[in-house]
């Protein structure tokens, strides 16, 4: 089962709340009617902590630090080093590299904002991804 980004964030938020509640139970900060059940709070807290760690690892694997459209993931840099290119190809490669740098900077901003990323950043990221994809198609066409 693959979780969407919003589902993952919601699950992590719920786990965070649950960890807080179970921590209160485990440290005797709850009403007396819960007192007989304190023995189970520590194992539950351990399980919740493990779930939180597992979901964080899952999130880190699903959202790699490197953009899927970066030159290195597409082999563009290797092509730059391996083949002599004409002026048009070099221009396209320079454009792709520049747009990828802008995209990386915006993705860092997006990650820092989390769920509250401004719309103009989201739109710019989408536009850059489209532009990079078009340039890569042009570069592949000019290489033939």
Image: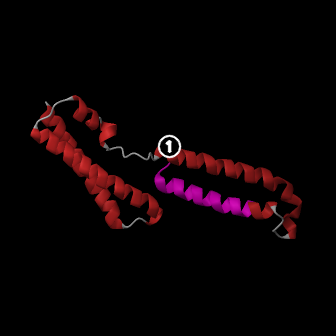
Q: Is residue 49 left or right of residue 108?
A: right
* Quarter of the figure with the C terminus: top left
Q: Main secondary structure of the magenta part?
A: helix
Q: Which residues are magenta?
A: 3-22
Mark 1, Cα crowd under 10 Å, few <14 / some 14-19 / many 20+, is few
Q: Tell me if residue 32 comes above or below residue 132 in the rendering.
A: below
**Residue 78 point in image, percent of width and height:** 28, 33
Give the vertical position of 1 relative to 13 (above or below). Answer: above
Q: Is residue 132 magenta?
A: no
Secondary-structure class at tag 1: helix
Q: Position of residue 30 (x, y in %)?
A: 81, 68
- Residue 20 counted in the magenta span: yes
Q: Which residue, as the protein is rendered here, is positioned at the far left? A: 87
Left or right position of 46 against 137: right
**Whole-percent x, y for residue 59 in the image:** 52, 48
Q: Residue at x 32, y 44 (%)?
A: 70
Say which quarter of the image contains residue 73.
top left
Residue 4 at x, y percent in the picture:
47, 51
Task: Please indicate whether residue 138 sits to the left or right of residue 21 in the image.
Answer: left
> Residue at the location (17% across, 39% down)?
139
Residue 94 is left or right of residue 68, and the answer is left
In the picture of the structure, the residue carrying the numbered disc 1 is 61
Instruction: Kindly identify the residue that appears in the image at 34 percent across and 61 percent down.
Output: 122
């Amino acid at each position: 089962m693959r979780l969407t980004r919003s589902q993952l964030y919601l699950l992590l938020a719920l786990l965070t709340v649950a960890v807080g509640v179970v921590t209160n139970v485990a440290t005797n900060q709850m009403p007396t009617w819960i007192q007989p059940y304190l023995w189970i709070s520590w194992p539950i807290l351990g399980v919740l902590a493990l779930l939180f760690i597992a979901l964080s690892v899952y999130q880190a694997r699903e959202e790699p630090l490197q953009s899927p459209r970066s030159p290195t993931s597409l082999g563009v840099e290797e092509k730059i080093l391996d083949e002599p290119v004409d002026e048009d190809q070099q221009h396209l490669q320079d454009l792709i590299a520049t747009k990828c740098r802008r995209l990386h900077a915006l993705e860092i901003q997006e990650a820092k904002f989390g769920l509250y990323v401004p719309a103009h950043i989201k739109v710019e990221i989408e536009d850059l991804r489209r532009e990079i994809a078009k340039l890569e198609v042009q570069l592949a066409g000019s290489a033939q």
